[in-house]
Image (cartoon, grey):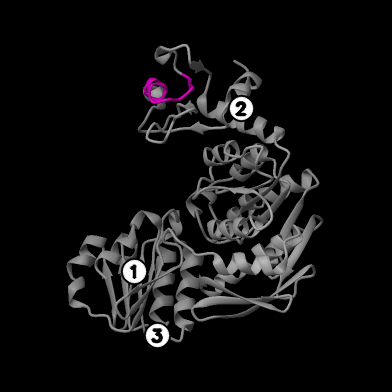
Amino acid sequence: MGIEELYNLYKKSYKVVKDTREDVTNSIYFSLKGESFNGNQYALQALENGANYAVIDQKSYHTDKRMILVEDVLTCLQELSNYHRQQLDIQILALTGSNGKTTTKELINAVLNEKYNCYATKGNLNNHIGVPLTLLSMTPEHNFGVVEMGANHQLEIADLCDIALPDFGFITNFGRVHLEGFGSFEGVVKGKTEMYRHLQAQGKKVFVNQDDPIQMDKSIGMDRVLFGPKGDDYQVTFIGADPFVSISFEEIEMDSQLIGSYNYANIAAAVSIGKYFGIETKKIKNAIQGFVPDNNRSQIITRDSNRIILDAYNANPNSMEVAIDNLKNLSAKNKVAILGDMFELGKDADLEHQRITDLAANAGFDRIFLIGEAFSRTKTSGKGLLQFSSFEKFTESFDQYEFIDTTLLVKASRGMALERILTYL
């Protein structure tokens, strides 16, 4: 079956799924495979549960006329999403970066929905599977799309751009993240700016934080919209962050529910992009002030007299730095940092964990808890700094610590699942 024929089947419902635990009713089920699972095994179950069709790539599972046999299911999914994208009469903004992708994407989506019927990537479905699923979730009812793109190696962003064919692009920042795959910070910059190269080749436009010298350098010669404190196109002023970020745009102050001065650039991007696409400043303000972070991303949680800054969705050296700096600069009386291991740093893991340990040790916090195998190997000095090789070791002695009127930062990579600490706090 060709892509055009498959596309006609897809248009009957505009619904695809990859997991039989989802609602498969009236959908096309794609039998994706991984290291520990084979979606072909569940194709028949998907049909029995209400799927219209099931795309498979192993002939031995072809037991129903509603099964569509292809050479490779993943390739078919990507080709179908690319074909669908070319049929959509819609503007698409793609964004990537080392930190703040999902928060920025949600902010942009909130702002654009003040005027458009915008569809944005759900959660962090931002890889070679997530981007196609995002595109295939867009229907003729939508008139704007925001696609988040993640990467941990070279050419991944280039491939995702070839699939999504964005009209606009934005890179949040460049940091020491996924060093195991990118090899170095220079490798990160090269990988992320594949988006610039794609957009430049297609004559498309980029939004650039004028305060970021790397963005400015790598976007030279492109059709770009510049924003920042002294942006050529849009000037967004940082007012403060204690703990929530406040900004000013066109003489209108906006008080967000995002903590940390590092979120200023994310808010500034959403404000500038919204203004570029014709959204009234007052409506932009409504969207910015109404946005509430969730999913363990820079959340403020109150427990008795304590305030918890929960930022346990992900971590890398750069995001650790700014989180520690933010806690340091808060006016809170008692401050505690609970930090968990950072993953995917490759050969730089020990060096980066030691650097973060030293940074935290010199920040003037009342206590610092370092959790994980990497942090347990760092050399420490000074009072109030404790190391634990695992979360379980940490919780064994947690009851002996008392927190009153304390601001606690909880920060770690996703694999540490450090949000579990809320049970103990």
Magenta stretch holds residue 281: no
The residue pinned by badge 3 equals 364
Q: Position of residue 55 (x, y in %)?
A: 49, 22
Other residues around mark 1 within 10 Å, as few (<14) / some (14–19) / many (≥20):
some
Q: What is the distance, in whole Å, between disc 1 and disc 3 at their CAs? A: 18 Å
| Of residues 14 and 197, the one drawn nearer to the viewer in this rendering | 14
Per the rendering, the mark at residue 87 is: none
Helix, strand or loop status at disc 2: loop
Quadrant in the picture for residue 277: bottom right
Helix, strand or loop status at disc 1: loop
Q: Position of residue 410 (x, y in %)?
A: 37, 69
Q: Which residues are magenta?
A: 44-57
Mark 1 vs mark 3: in front: 3
Please tell me which residue is depicted at 38% across the width and 33% down the height of the picture.
Answer: 35
Instruction: Say whether residue 327 is left or right of residue 131.
Output: left
Instruction: Say whether residue 384 is left or right of residue 235.
Output: left
User: Residue type at mark 1?
Assistant: Thr
Q: What is the distance, in whole Å, between disc 2 and disc 3 at their CAs? A: 59 Å
Helix, strand or loop status at disc 3: loop
Please tell me which residue is depicted at 47% across the width and 27% down the height of the picture.
Answer: 29
The answer to whether residue 148 is visible is no
Figure quadrant of the C terminus? bottom left
Mark 1 vs mark 2: in front: 2
User: Residue type at mark 2?
Assistant: Lys
Quadrant in the picture for residue 282: bottom right
Quadrant in the picture for residue 215: bottom right
Other residues around mark 3 within 10 Å, as few (<14) / some (14–19) / many (≥20):
some
The residue pinned by badge 1 equals 378
User: Residue type at mark 3?
Assistant: Gly
Q: Position of residue 110 (x, y in %)?
A: 60, 58
Q: Are marks 1 and 2 in contact (CB under 8 Å)?
A: no
The residue pinned by badge 2 equals 11
